[in-house]
């Protein structure tokens, strides 16, 4: 009898250990790893929400920028970190769904991470040089079809969100344009404004000020519906049904992180991003607050995976 009592006590302790961990977590600062440099949209979002998490949990959520290999270095670091809730990854769609298709990485995006919550989503926007005699997406397509191969489009490099979204769009619109990749976003925008390139499929935050100044003409957004920031811009899907490319920013953790910690974080993030002040700060930088559950996060990724596989195949990119 004593043996069975001991076994039951041991089983009970094992069952309650994760719950107790979640109730006492965090007891020290939490590291939030961002795969890009400070000052960009992803970094800004990580800092906005992590500051609020610090206030909610009473421990600092410290943003750490780990650069390199388009975000693979940051992803690999988090994948190998202890699964104790003290290292989180503030990722984008690129590190989870695109990079593993275009370059060799030492992490498995589907097996090495536990999704927590998507903070925000945002579509991309088609911007063109104002010298083009077009005001609508249909006019742009007609203009391009009359000049096959004579116009070019910019991107931040082969295999990036903008490049792959453009490839999908050109395929649907039956357009032929030349790809001009850039290493510097600043130089890209300078050349778009200067007319050296005619089109760029980029994030809203890159366009807002230039569009207001009349330096770039905006034609459409890549989401299923129109954006609140650009209510007059049609969605590409209004012309080409089913077209959708959306990026996201969200928190993930090493895969074995206790579920109660994951769930607590997801609940608080969902509350934080919908706080009026926080939501307004996110909208101002061109993204739409979301704050979903781990299950919804997983479904979001599962839904988008075929789109990015198709885009990589259409672009003819082979894994390096």
Image (tube, rainbow, N blue to C red):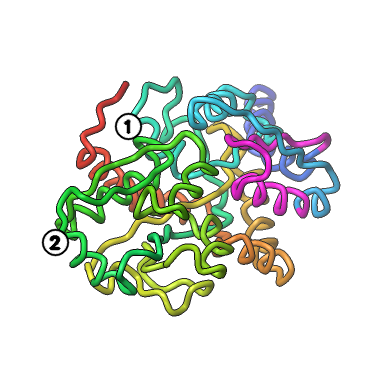
x, y percent for residue 73: 54, 24
Q: Residues within 10 Å of mark 1 (few under 14, many from 20)?
A: many
Q: Which residues are magenta?
A: 27-52
x, y percent for residue 228: 51, 74
Depth check, mark 1 against mark 2: the one in front is 2
Does label 1 or label 2 sit earlier along the sequence?
1
Report whether 70 appears left or right of 65.
Answer: left
Decide: is 268 above or below 94.
below
Q: Quadrant of the C terminus?
A: top left
Dividing the picture into quadrants, the one containing residue 256 is: top right
List the residue tagged with mark 2: 146
x, y percent for residue 202: 44, 53
**Residue at horizontal 68%, vertical 36%?**
85
Q: CA distance from mark 1 to mark 2?
A: 34 Å
Closest to the observer, 126 or 248: 126
Report whether 235 appears left or right of 29.
Answer: left
Report whether 56 appears left or right of 202.
Answer: right
x, y percent for residue 89: 60, 37
């Amino acid at each position: 009898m004593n043996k069975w009592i001991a076994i039951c006590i041991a089983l009970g302790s094992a069952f309650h250990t994760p719950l107790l961990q979640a109730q006492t977590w965090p007891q020290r600062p939490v590291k939030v790893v961002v795969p890009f440099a400070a000052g960009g949209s992803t970094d800004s979002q990580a800092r906005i929400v992590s500051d609020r998490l610090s206030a909610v949990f009473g421990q600092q959520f410290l943003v750490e920028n780990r650069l390199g290999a388009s975000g693979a270095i940051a992803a690999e670091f988090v994948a190998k970190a202890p699964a104790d809730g003290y290292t989180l990854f503030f990722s984008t769609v690129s590190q989870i769904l695109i990079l593993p298709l275009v370059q060799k990485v030492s992490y498995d995006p589907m097996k090495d991470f536990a999704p927590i919550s998507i903070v925000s989503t945002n579509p991309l926007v088609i911007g063109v040089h104002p010298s083009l005699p077009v005001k609508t997406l249909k006019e742009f397509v007609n203009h391009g079809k009359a000049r096959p191969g004579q116009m070019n489009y910019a991107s931040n490099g082969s295999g990036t969100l903008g490049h792959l979204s453009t490839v999908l769009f050109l395929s649907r619109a039956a357009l032929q344009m030349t790809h001009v990749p850039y290493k510097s976003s600043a130089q890209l925008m300078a050349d778009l404004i200067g007319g050296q390139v005619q089109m760029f499929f980029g994030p809203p935050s890159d366009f807002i000020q230039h569009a207001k100044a009349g330096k770039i003409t905006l034609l459409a957004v890549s989401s299923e519906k129109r954006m609140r920031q650009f209510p007059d811009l049609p969605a590409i899907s209004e012309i080409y049904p089913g077209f959708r490319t959306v990026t996201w920013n969200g928190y993930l953790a090493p895969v074995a992180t206790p579920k109660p910690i994951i769930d607590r974080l997801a609940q608080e993030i969902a509350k934080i991003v919908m706080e009026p002040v926080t939501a307004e700060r996110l909208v101002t930088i061109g993204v739409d607050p979301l704050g979903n559950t781990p299950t919804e996060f997983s479904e979001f990724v599962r839904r988008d995976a075929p789109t990015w596989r198709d885009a990589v195949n259409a672009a003819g990119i082979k894994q390096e």
